[in-house]
Image (cartoon, rainbow, N blue to C red):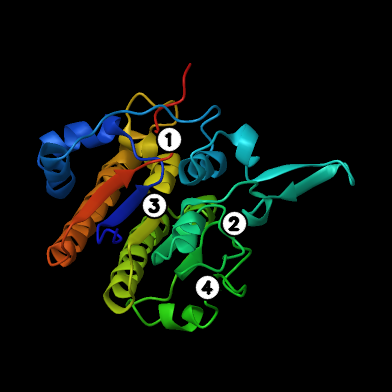
């Protein structure tokens, strides 16, 4: 029996929600996501309990609940010091999808998945995600890939956008720029890697959809307790702009994949987003 030539691309939109996607797709703002929904299958899925990014993505890539893979959050209690310690890929108690595929001789491209630092040796390439301690760390496998990433986009590579920093400094205009920059850098990196390296699975995660909801929902939603109508005139469309940019880049990626035979595409999320309850 010969191995299948089938390929898979998984696009992760962190925190993406159908509460936004459905009306915007119906309005024509997300033509590429709308096309995927119309030509494929889609539905609302239940996240893990509690729906935290670290454990949700780890459950997705291991196929197990957090009691088995043992990643519950970005940090956990350290009973030796009575303090806390950050969790990363080294604390995951089960193999991930890329480990199994590498053992089976399949080539993988893994980019920006949470809880993937330090990057693991794989058959292919890995660029670790938000648990990376900083750009000074060796966040790629192989290590030489790190130098390559800064030259695939018009701006240096970014792991976690500085949206939170600029919001703390009361500069939502710069936070918005950071979110859009992260989308372009991520898609540029993945498109480059898929063009120059062999792959059977390409799996990457966009952080901007999560950050945009965290920091810009109050401008988007007039029922939000912090909603300011004046600021909303300037920033109220930021969430939609982030989703539009993702949709635009998904369209470009689909065009690149048009020449790839027998390739499936998944768009997935770790949890939804919404307004705070009363």
Whichever of labels 2 and 1 marks the residue nearer the N terminus, that label is 2
Residue 224 place in picture, x, y as percent: 40, 27
- Residue receiving disc 4: 141
Task: Quadrant for the N terminus, please.
Answer: bottom left
Would residue 101 be visible to someone looking at this image? yes
The answer to whether mark 2 and mark 3 are in CB contact below 8 A is no
Q: Is residue 126 above or below residue 209?
A: below
Comparing labels 4 and 1, the label whose residue is closer to the camera:
4
Determine the secondary structure under disc 4. strand
Residue 58 place in picture, x, y as percent: 53, 44
Residue 131, numbered circle: 2
Residue at the image position 35 percent from the left and 40 percent from the top? 16
- Residue receiving disc 3: 208
- Residue receiving disc 1: 271
Q: Is residue 224 above or below residue 265?
A: above
Residue at the image position 31 percent from the left and 36 percent from the top? 220
Q: Residues within 10 Å of mark 4 (few under 14, many from 20)?
A: many
Q: Residues within 10 Å of mark 2 (few under 14, many from 20)?
A: many
The answer to whether mark 4 and mark 1 are in CB contact below 8 A is no
Whichever of labels 2 and 3 marks the residue nearer the N terminus, that label is 2
Q: Nearer the viewer, residue 116 or 6?
A: 6
Determine the secondary structure under disc 3. helix
Whichever of labels 3 and 1 marks the residue nearer the N terminus, that label is 3
Q: Nearer the viewer, residue 219 or 125?
A: 125
Task: Give me the C-alpha separation between circle 3 and circle 1.
Answer: 14 Å
Corner quadrant of residue 78: top right
Q: Is residue 135 above or below residue 25?
A: below
């Amino acid at each position: 029996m010969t191995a299948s030539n089938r390929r898979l691309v998984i696009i992760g939109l962190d925190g993406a929600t159908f509460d936004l996607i459905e009306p915007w797709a119906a309005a024509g703002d997300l033509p590429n996501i709308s096309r995927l929904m119309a030509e494929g299958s889609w539905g609302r899925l239940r996240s893990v309990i509690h729906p935290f990014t670290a454990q949700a993505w780890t459950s997705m890539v291991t196929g197990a609940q957090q009691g088995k893979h043992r990643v519950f959050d970005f940090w956990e209690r350290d009973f030796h010091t009575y303090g806390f310690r950050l969790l990363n890929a080294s604390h995951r108690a089960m193999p991930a999808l890329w480990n199994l595929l590498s053992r089976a001789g399949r080539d993988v491209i893994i980019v920006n998945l949470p809880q993937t630092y330090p990057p693991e040796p794989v058959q292919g390439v890995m660029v670790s995600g938000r648990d990376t301690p900083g750009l000074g760390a060796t966040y790629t496998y192989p290590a030489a890939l790190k130098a390559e990433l800064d030259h695939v986009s018009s701006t240096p590579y970014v792991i976690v956008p500085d949206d939170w920093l600029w919001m703390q400094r009361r500069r939502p205009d710069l936070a918005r720029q950071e979110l859009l920059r992260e989308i372009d850098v991520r898609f540029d990196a993945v498109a480059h890697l898929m063009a120059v390296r062999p792959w059977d699975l390409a799996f990457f995660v966009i952080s901007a959809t999560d950050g945009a909801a965290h920091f810009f929902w109050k401008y988007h939603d007039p029922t939000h307790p912090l909603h300011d109508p004046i600021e909303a005139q300037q920033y109220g469309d930021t969430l939609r702009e982030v989703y539009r940019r993702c949709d635009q880049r998904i369209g470009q990626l689909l065009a690149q994949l048009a020449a790839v035979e027998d390739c499936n595409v998944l768009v997935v999320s770790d949890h939804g987003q919404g307004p705070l309850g009363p």
